[in-house]
Image (cartoon, rainbow, N blue to C red):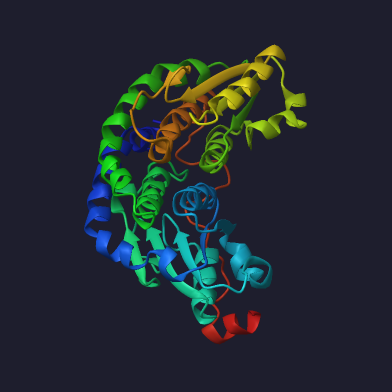
Amino acid sequence: MNGEFTRQEILSQPESWAAALTVLTRARRDILSLAPTRRYRQVIFTGCGSTYYLALAAAALTQELTGLPGRALPASELWLYPRASYVDEPTLLVAVSRSGETTETLRACQAFRAQQRGELVTLSCYPQAHLATMGALNLVLPSGQEQSVAQTRAFSTLYLGTVALATLWAGRDDLFAALERLPDAGRKVIEQALPLAADLGRDLSIDRFYWLGSGPRYGLAAELSLKMKEMSLTHSEPFHFLEFRHGPKSMVTPSALVIGLRSTVNGQHEMAVLEDVRALGGRVLALAEANADLAFQSGLDEAIRNLLYLPPGQLLALERALTRKLDPDHPNHLEAVVQLKEVMPTDEDMIALE
């Protein structure tokens, strides 16, 4: 059946999160030993494709919780444009890759080490991967492994890993402990999302999707937009919430669906944007902790409940793909791992780039 692997991977995310939390709890001491606030001036998160969007969300959350500057860059930028990517400050680099074999990510990490810019933390899902041997700390979360090409379970599980890093590095033991409640909250959200995603995903009168999220949620909006593109080959774009008013709202039509990843702290401002969309004749789907089309009602702090936005958006993309008779397990033109054919350069080559 089309999408069999993808559906199973989306639905099994709460179990994957629980298994990942066991790994992260065991690694707690090692994670704390690399707390960036002790000796680094910045944290850079990097990845490719989905994990670059993960990096955007992780960098925003880490800066929010720790107060340390957090940035996100595609691995190819760190590799090919180091002078434009780094400032001359001690850096902690966090590299994320589902496979641990993405060429650009490996090269970015190799260059980072060769140029002695700081220390490296890696997150991946496969213990035998090259990336899982490169860092001062290598976190492997095998419960995120997938058979499908488009990331769903891997993305959320690896993102959970970066949330755990941020809470521990910020000294927020309360938030780290509360992560144990996420699997149960995730199961409830998935149960709510299934009929809603089916109704909207099967509605082919919708011809475009816009995903709005701000702060740590912008990276998640970008990832969910990518899922819609990859799985269903449908026009889909992400925006920061209030930026949608500055031009993009011209694209609102009765066939547009705008999905808002609404926060609590700025929910009033974000809801006003969604009301603008309704006034222009567009359709709206609000996701939030409360008072939304899909309300999480998790009782979790906003910093850690952001994970709950992912399953509803993934399910919507899945249903859209299946309705269009596509196979989301094998998206058009895509491979699970992007590996360049060129020979990996030596450390000397990487130093020469600098």
Determine whether 112 is above or below 251 in the image.
below
In x, y percent, where is residue 295?
A: 42, 21
In x, y percent, where is residue 178?
A: 28, 40
Q: Residue furthest bottom?
A: 348
Determine whether 315 is above or below 280 in the image.
below
Count of marks overlaid on the render? 0
Q: Is residue 189 visible?
A: yes
Q: Say which residue appears at 54% left-offset and 26% top-offset.
A: 267
Check the picture and name the quadrant holding the C terminus: bottom right
Determine whether 124 is above or below 323 in the image.
below
- Which image quadrant for residue 306? top left
- Which image quadrant for residue 184? top left
Q: Say which residue appears at 65% left-offset and 69% top-offset.
A: 80
In x, y percent, where is residue 228?
A: 55, 33
Judged left or right of residue 282, residue 140 is: left
Determine whether 149 is above or below 324 in the image.
below
Judged left or right of residue 196, residue 8 is: left
In x, y percent, where is residue 127?
A: 31, 63
Relative depth, front residue between 304 and 197 = 304
Check the picture and name the quadrant holding the N terminus: top left
Q: Is residue 127 visible?
A: no
Q: Say which residue appears at 32% left-offset and 68% top-offset.
A: 33
Q: Say which residue appears at 48% left-offset and 15% top-offset.
A: 199
Relative depth, front residue between 28 and 156 = 28
